[in-house]
Image (cartoon, rainbow, N blue to C red):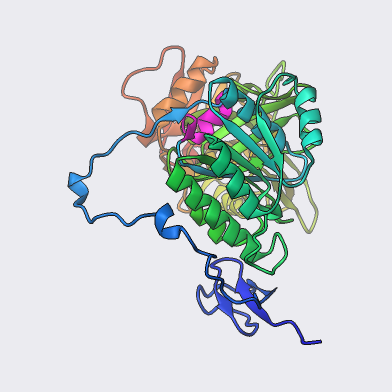
Amino acid sequence: MAKEKTQYTCTDCGGITAKWLGKCPSCNAWNTLIETAVDSSGPTKNRYAGMAALAPPSEVAILSDIEAQDVARTPTGQEELDRVLGGGMVEGGVVLIGGDPGIGKSTLILQAMDGLQRSGMSTLYVTGEESASQVALRSRRLGLDHSQVQVVAETQLEKILATVDKLQPAVVVMDSIQTVYSDQLTSAPGSVAQVRECASHLTRMAKSTGTAVVLVGHVTKEGALAGPRVLEHMVDTVLYFEGDTHSTYRLVRAIKNRFGAVNEIGVFAMTEKGLKGVSNPSAIFLSQHTEPVPGSCVLVTLEGTRPMLVEIQALVDSGGPSPRRLSVGLDRDRLAMLLAVLHRHAGVACMDQDVFVNAVGGVRISEPAADLAVLLSIQSSLRGKPLPQGFIAFGEVGLAGEVRPAPRGQERLKEAAKLGFTVAVIPKANAPKKPIPGMTVHAVERVDDAIGLVRELG
């Protein structure tokens, strides 16, 4: 029996090489080549048949002469999902959503498809992991007893495309892209070649027919979307479903969006009837203390276009000869840098102390505007004295001890004032030109000024 021929495909760029190499020769990424079977049947005549018809060539035009039109959006009925998408589904748009198993991807998509169907759009739900009866059982559990969403259980790409061509739906869901395979390839479903090929055909179909396509994707143990990196480049929108399966709250974050803002988030609560949008997410990220406690500082962070208030908690305790530095929801390396700045420029030493920092509610904060709130919460815990009632802070801290401005500072202050906060410590460059009713704003230039101000207020 002849030995099956193999080749090595890069999971990042899709490049192919005949032998395994430590570094991909196309994109120079390390350890991204995986072994795949060579399609021994050779290229068939109809593998790319119809591509010219799907994407006919267009004439060359001057950019300034092209008429720009706003894309029409159709709301899904899920306000938080619409916020992340940029207002709703776009005709011909391709959305990729990934998340951990059991996080609620299929639940959210089924609810959104039912909302689109009720608004008058034709929908098709293609399931490759469940039977049609299992999808129907979930819809009953979600209270969608009379849903008219069309469902088909199929994994072969050619049959899926034929079904879409026959029904002409406005929105198609593929749950999941890793289960789809094409007869034109001999590799197994979920392989790099199959995922790339199937996603490419579905994307071309969406662009040529105007059908919106939603692809549900698996994730690796590191949390990244499984399959070739080119999958994220092909689609218009990439959404990540985040959250702890032990918590009732879920976050949907836009990593890429050609039709809206990136890093926008939607907040959902898991209930018996599925996922419900949370209109005031600041409430779930703030602990309800009857009185101020040491080590707690409220940060006004910015997620996409939405200002949110998040409580930063710090605990400083004696750590012995090998003190630990642990952060949850914040960058651990940045925490070590901030402790060095606190020591050098404010005279506050934590070298023999364990320092634990946590962002309440499971939210992940990546923007540097959280620096000042982290330092003030650490100082509060070290002194054992709480910050004043109704206190908020934000601002980036540099290695020279300066407090740098945060983007859209006015919106942050207005959001905090709306929720009843009365005292703010912010960068001097973010100082409002007009007083904010009900709020006292203290603008600082350096981290030692902020520490001294908090000592006076406390």
Rendered residue at 75%/26% (across/down):
139
Q: Position of residue 252 (x, y in %)?
A: 61, 37
- For the image shown, how many numbered marks are present on the structure? 0
Q: Position of residue 457 (x, y in %)?
A: 55, 24
Is 16 positioned to the left or the right of 141 in the image? left
Residue 303 seen: no
The picture quadrant where one finds residue 17 is bottom right
Is 227 positioned to the left or the right of 49 in the image? right
Q: Is residue 410 above or below residue 346?
A: above
Q: Position of residue 434 (x, y in %)?
A: 32, 19
Q: Nearer the viewer, residue 371 or 454?
A: 371
Q: Which residues are magenta?
A: 78-90
Residue 301 magenta: no
Q: Position of residue 187 (x, y in %)?
A: 70, 68
- Of the 4 image quadrants, the one containing the N terminus is bottom right
Q: Is residue 79 above or below residue 172?
A: above
Rendered residue at 56%/74% (across/down):
43
Residue 5 seen: yes
Rendered residue at 35%/25% (across/down):
432
- Of the 4 image quadrants, the one containing the C terminus is top right
Residue 81 magenta: yes
Q: Residue furthest bottom?
A: 2
